[in-house]
Amino acid sequence: MKNIPKPSSKQIRLYLKSWKKDERYFLSEDCLNNLFLQTYPKNLKLEEVLTKVCTLDVMYSAGASRWFFEVSENIKKLNIDEKLEKGDLEVVNLIAKINTTKRKERNLYSFATKYCNHHRPEHYPIYDSYVEKTLSHFNKYNGKFIDYPIKELKNYKFFKETILKFRDFYNLREFTLREIDIYLWLLGKKYFPNNYLRKKVNNSG
């Protein structure tokens, strides 16, 4: 068990302050916001979608680098703009599942949440391993706010529901979903680095 401070308004403000001070984070965010919300807000032209997919993947290490064209073509043909406008959660799953050139289906779930988030940040929270580990920790050690297995976070409906329940459980409704997102990610990056799970596996014998 890691000694992580309990979620509170004070803690979230501290992490949001550190985010705003770090150029790596806020300049990247501004760049992506300009690209997704101002320059290419629609997803009808392949060249525009491809630009967003590539830029997002480079800045967020989103896992789509080997399948730029397959991902972009999939997004274009799905006609997702109306679904995004409505906040339809199913659009995440539609974007995530692609067939590669070897006809093998891939599920780029984390990438899909990031792509949707940069169109509608207050409707589509971002899933990644840091966020999952942080939510799992608090649910296990600070009082259960969900009663389903943490693996259900790979179902986007449950993931968004979990973020909302986390916010309610700790009385953090003053913060937007994007602010909660940032806090959970920074916390996970600090306390659960990428080699954390590998160490657990290696030490298990």
Image (cartoon, rainbow, N blue to C red):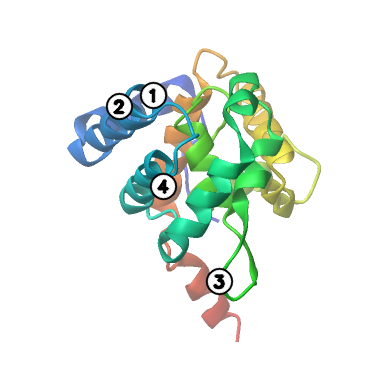
Q: Judge depth for marks 4 and 3 and give the one in front.
A: 3
Assign a secondary structure to mark 3.
loop
Identify residue for label 2: 34
For marks 4 and 3 on the same chain, the one whose residue lies earlier in the sequence: 4
From this viewpoint, which residue is outermost toward the bottom? Answer: 205
The residue type indicated by label 3 comes to Thr
CB contact under 8 Å: marks 2 and 1: yes
The residue type indicated by label 1 comes to Leu
In the image, what residue occupies the spot 53% across and 82% down? Answer: 202
Compared with 73, 11 (above or below) is above
Density class for disc 1 (Cα within 10 Å; few <14, some 14-19, many ≥20) is few
Assign a secondary structure to mark 2.
helix
In the image, what residue occupies the spot 47% across and 27% down? Answer: 178
Q: Quadrant of residue 69?
A: bottom left
Instruction: Choose between 80 and 2: the one closer to the eye.
Output: 80
Q: CA distance from mark 4 to mark 2?
A: 14 Å
Identify residue for label 1: 37
Identify residue for label 4: 53
Left or right of residue 66, residue 134 in this image: right
Density class for disc 2 (Cα within 10 Å; few <14, some 14-19, many ≥20) is some
What percent of the width, then of the height, locates residue 98? Answer: 61, 58
